[in-house]
Image: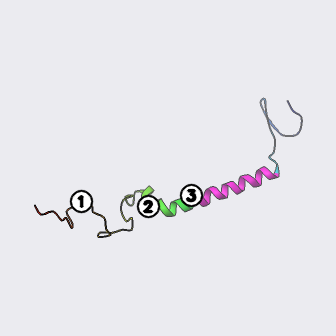
Amino acid sequence: MAGGHGHKFADLTLHAPKAWQTRTGQGLCAVMWLWIMYRAKSDGAVLMGWRHPWDGHGHGHGAGHDSGHGHGSKSSH
């Protein structure tokens, strides 16, 4: 096996990470948590089951959508 210092466990030697690896890992961890918080802000209520995905999509009734419930039907049966 390669020489150098490190912690030895059975046949495995673990070496300390380099400084750039530590900084890169911390940066990616920060990006991950920021993304999780952004998504929680957007979709948290749906994920937790507090509302359905189709509730409160911002259009409301009468926004030009024909929902098929008979509201504003032009047919005269």
Magenta stretch holds residue 58: no
Displayed quadrant of residue 9: top right
Residues 5 and 66: in front is: 66
Q: Report the disc number at residue 45.
A: 2
Q: Amino acid at mark 3?
A: Ile
Looking at the image, the residue that sits furthest to the front is 75
Segment colored magenta: 19-35
Looking at the image, the residue that sits furthest to the left is 77
Question: Around disc 1, counting alpha carbons within 10 Å, would you say few (fewer than 14), some (14 to 19), or many (20 or more)?
Answer: few
Q: Report the disc number at residue 37.
A: none
Q: Secondary structure at mark 2?
A: helix
Q: Position of residue 48 (x, y in %)?
A: 43, 57
Q: Secondary structure at mark 3?
A: helix
Q: Is residue 24 left or right of residue 65?
A: right
Q: Is residue 44 left or right of residue 73?
A: right
Q: Report the disc number at residue 68.
A: 1
Q: Amino acid at mark 2?
A: Ala
Instruction: Name the front one of labels 1 and 2.
Output: 1
